[in-house]
Image: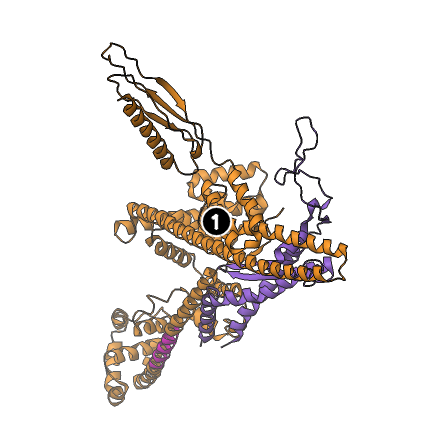
Amino acid sequence: MASNEQMKFTLDFLAKTSGLKESAALSAKLSDALDDADTEATMLAKAMSVAADHIERDLKETTEYAERLGNALGPELRAKIGAGGVDSLASRFRSAGISIQDAEQNIDQLAAGVQRLDGLSDKAAASMNKLDGRDQSGSVRANFLGNAAQEIPGVTGAMGPLNMAIGQFVEYGAEGNISLKNLAAMAGPMLGVAVAMELVSKYQKEVAAVKAWKKGEVDAFTKSLKSGADVAEDLKDRLLEAGKIEFKMNRLFGGDVLDDMNRAGLSVDQFIAAVQGGDPAIQKMVDALSAAGVEGDDLSNILFAAKSYQENLTQARETYAALQKAGLAATDEEIEANRRLKVSGDAIVKMLEDKKAAAQEDIDTMYDYEESVIAADDAYADYLQSLKDADKAAKDANTTDAERADILRDLRNQQMSQAEGLYATAVAFSTEQGAAEGSRAAHMLQRDALIEMQKKYPLLADEIQKYIDKLNSIPGVKNTNVTIRYGGGAGGTGADGTGSSGDTGNINLGSGAGNIQSIQSAGGRGGSTPPVALTVNLYGPVMNGDREVVDMISRAVNDGVRAAWMAGN
Amino acid sequence: MIDTSDLDALTRKLQRLAAGFDGPTKVRVLKKVDKPLQADVEKAVRADLGDLSMSGWRRGRPVPIIPTARVRTDGIAVSPAGRAIGPMRTLSEGRNGGGGFQGPGVNARTGATKRTKKGNLARVRARRNNGTTRGKGTWTDAVRLMQDTAPKVLRKAVIDEVGEVFRGK
């Protein structure tokens, strides 16, 4: 028959919010990163704009300069030097600090100087070339960028965590490829994570140079290594987290090798193990795949991916070793200490969780007991009402014998089921007190509870007594065999020379506290001594407590011994 | 120009959602599950009885066989309400073995009939036969219904809570 406990449907709702919190942190980080990049890009754009203004002005002035100088040189010399040469001269004069206004006023003198130089045309040309320090081969755009970078210190040094080319980034944003509208309308935390991850991965895909990608990966490795994580474990976690295994080959090709691995039946764990094992392990993996019939693009892609990641791992380990040497990363001892701390931390967390679970269990057993008590009170109230109804029906002349019999039967059923319920309440009480189910302590607590219930529910006293008797008869109590060995004292010789020794032997006092007998051990006459050997052995627990029985036996024996001694004397 | 205000709003909403599911939101969700589960129990009882009580238990004032639900620390527990435990058990498992009175001297624990050394039926003081009923498996049916209802209602309640956060400011 099912217990009350089995008629209970429990729904556990464990809301895990760590995913939500991580999503929020990722979203915030992305927002900050975009803000930073935005700020730097905006700054650079402004710098570009300022530099462009300067250069445009310079170009305009230089053009005017060259035009004036060319006019002053005259058509023949001008043709000889060439347009580029005139531009160069103009630029040089400007660099020398001669403004266009000065040049305008002194252009004839400048031209005269050039004409003089023309007389030494080869030498002059060679000299001008030597003297001209401006990089003619660079494009205006390159200089433009270079000057712009120099305008704002630190811009080229750190472009933020997204590590993209400046122009690409600004262009990307200007074209509206980053769609941030309506994000707030999306429901579901996983969608938020997916959106954030999509944006980050979109940026990461724009990294053009393998070197930059590798640097970014190594930086991320380094950052995680500083907190003491294991290099290889971190690699595996990052791969699994990203959900893809990308590789770059010859800076031209790349892709996700997971499909190839799936077709080949190669798991991520096996892949990682091969990468960690170095060249021999990778070769072993390739040999195994070949033997299994994997070939062609699948096999080559897997090999390239393994090599690619092996390079990253090697780089990460070298970086980590260098960081350790520079004191910027945890040493092996610190890592071990962190690991032990984590283990003990986990143990503490488990202990606290166990304590919490135990406390919850205690609360629940307390609720079960209280519910049981309330139900018992309700049932008794119903029973009393039923008795009144039965009494009324019995006095009613219209009630038939069959109906009377039914009423009595119902009352009897109520009595029995209530008594059973009260027994269940007593069991709940013993559980609530912490006694183990089926233990002697539990039975004693249940019996005590039932005795109290007899007073509370007097009309059910007889039924309750049956459960008390049942508890009393449960063989959790062992019979006690008490054996006392005694030895009689040697008899002395009396005046007439006779004397007998006292008795010796064992007496079994039987079992249970009610069977203590007083014994006497007679000593010999004349100079007898009381028995000296008294050993009490108790086998098994006694219901009323071991100490009490021993005391009773000791008293009985002592009384007997005293009596014997007195009789002897 | 890149506008990151939407991302900031998303961050705030996700944080609010996490804080809610660590506490008050969970309680709100469980309270939404409470009534549908209790309705499932009543449905199972009605399917077997036609209504919510057995006319003979008690005579003249039948005990309603209804459930009670208690929100515990990390969930909810549904069981027959106090007085309804006995009737529910009888309804589910029957009375007196469900297959007939098993005769006097049947050991309630072992089910064995007490006999003398010669193998004859032992004379014992036996209960009066108060009839037998077959169990209808009512509680089992109720559990099946609740197992089906709980995930659906829970999921909808969670989605409603999430939607509430994301639709708000």
Q: Residue A209: image x %, image y %? A: 43, 59
- Can residue A51 be found in the magenta stretch? yes
Any part of residue B139 in sight: no
Is residue A9 placed above or below A163 in the rendered structure?
above
| Chain that is coloured orange in the picture | A
Secondary structure predominantly adopted by residues drawn in magenta: helix
Q: What residue is shown at x 34% (from left), y 66% (from top)? A: A158
Residue A85 in picture, x, y percent from top left: 33, 76
Q: Label 1 belongs to which residue?
A: A431
Residue farthest to the bottom, as pictured = A105
> Does residue A387 appear to the left or right of B17 in the view shown?
right
Q: Measured along the vertical axis of the image, is residue A410 above or below residue B19?
A: above
Magenta segment range? A41-54
Q: Amino acid at mark 1?
A: Thr
Q: Quadrant of residue B150?
A: bottom right
Q: What color is chain B drawn in? A: purple
Based on the picture, tell me whether residue A150 belongs to the magenta stretch: no
Question: Does A253 sit above or below residue A112?
Answer: above
* Quadrant of the drawing holding the C terminus of chain A: top left
